């Protein structure tokens, strides 16, 4: 019985990963952020979070109907019901933040400067903590691969509290080579059992590793 439950958990996680990658590509213009899937005995409720809900719904519901049918066919989902939710603040959504960083890097921006600016912007929007990691060829052709980490505020690294951190991973493809990006954000008002929430002051300069 335990093996059956574990296998189902793995399968469900894999299916969600595939659906997330599919929606990320299909709803790129809508500003796809994340998806939540809840299966009930009658329907499979799929909540899609985007920055532009109108692009998902379409005129007369045409786009969302096509998307529903596509998910049903591609992933064999029984009776999928899609709900569209607008992202409250795109600057606090890891996937959207990572996408903006990727675009900036692909336009030739300086990685260190971009990461510093974005982390400060995340914190200015009320986050309790933010961390961005970029790994790969972060300079012109011929440069060695390296890692830049920029972090500010409170960011748990171990234990159950890590589950309270929103995270997204993305790859940027500038001309000089691929760059892996990881964005982690502690949302405003997140309650940690071992920590009292405090306001984070933005320093003029802070270290990267």
Image (spheres, rainbow, N blue to C red):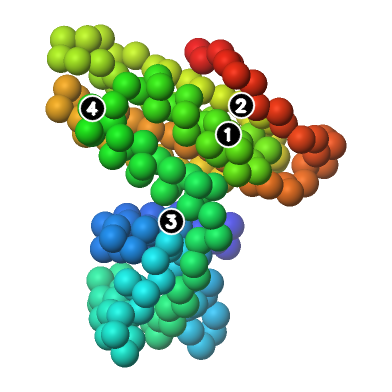
Spatial CA distance of label 2 from label 1 is: 5 Å
Rendered position, 152 above or below 66: above
Disc 3 target residue: 33
- The nearer-to-camera label among 3 and 4 is 4
Going 47% across and 33% down the picture, which residue do you hit? 118
Q: Is residue 181 above or below residue 139?
A: below
Q: Write down the quadrant of residue 13 in the picture.
A: bottom left
Q: Residue furthest front?
A: 204
Horizontal and vertical percent position of residue 70: 26, 76
What's the distance in space between the residues labelled 1 and 3, CA to CA? 17 Å
Name the front one of labels 1 and 4. 4
| C-beta proximity under 8 Å, tags 1 and 3 | no
Q: Earlier in the sequence, mark 1 or mark 3?
A: 3
Sequence-first disc among 2 and 4:
4
Residue 152 shows which numbered tag?
2
Instruction: Tell me the number on the disc at residue 130.
Output: 1
Q: Earlier in the sequence, mark 2 or mark 1?
A: 1
């Amino acid at each position: 019985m335990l093996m059956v439950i574990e296998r189902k958990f793995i399968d469900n996680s894999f299916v969600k990963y595939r659906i997330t990658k599919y929606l990320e590509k299909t709803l790129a213009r809508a500003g796809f952020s994340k998806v939540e899937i809840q299966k009930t005995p009658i329907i499979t409720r799929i909540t899609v979070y985007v920055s532009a809900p109108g692009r998902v719904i379409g005129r007369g519901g045409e786009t969302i109907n096509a998307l529903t049918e596509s998910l049903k066919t591609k992933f064999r989902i029984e009776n999928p019901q899609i709900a569209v939710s607008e992202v409250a603040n795109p600057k606090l959504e890891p996937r959207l933040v990572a996408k903006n960083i990727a675009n900036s890097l692909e336009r030739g921006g300086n990685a260190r400067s971009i990461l510093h600016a974005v982390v400060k912007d995340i914190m200015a929007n009320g986050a309790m903590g933010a961390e961005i990691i970029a790994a790969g060829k972060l300079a012109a052709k011929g440069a060695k691969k390296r890692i830049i980490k920029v972090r500010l505020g409170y960011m748990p690294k171990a234990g159950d509290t890590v589950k309270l951190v929103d995270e997204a991973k993305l790859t940027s493809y500038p001309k000089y080579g691929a760059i892996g990006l990881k964005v982690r954000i502690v949302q405003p008002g997140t309650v940690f059992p071992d920590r009292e929430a405090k306001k984070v002051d933005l320093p003029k300069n802070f270290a990267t590793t």
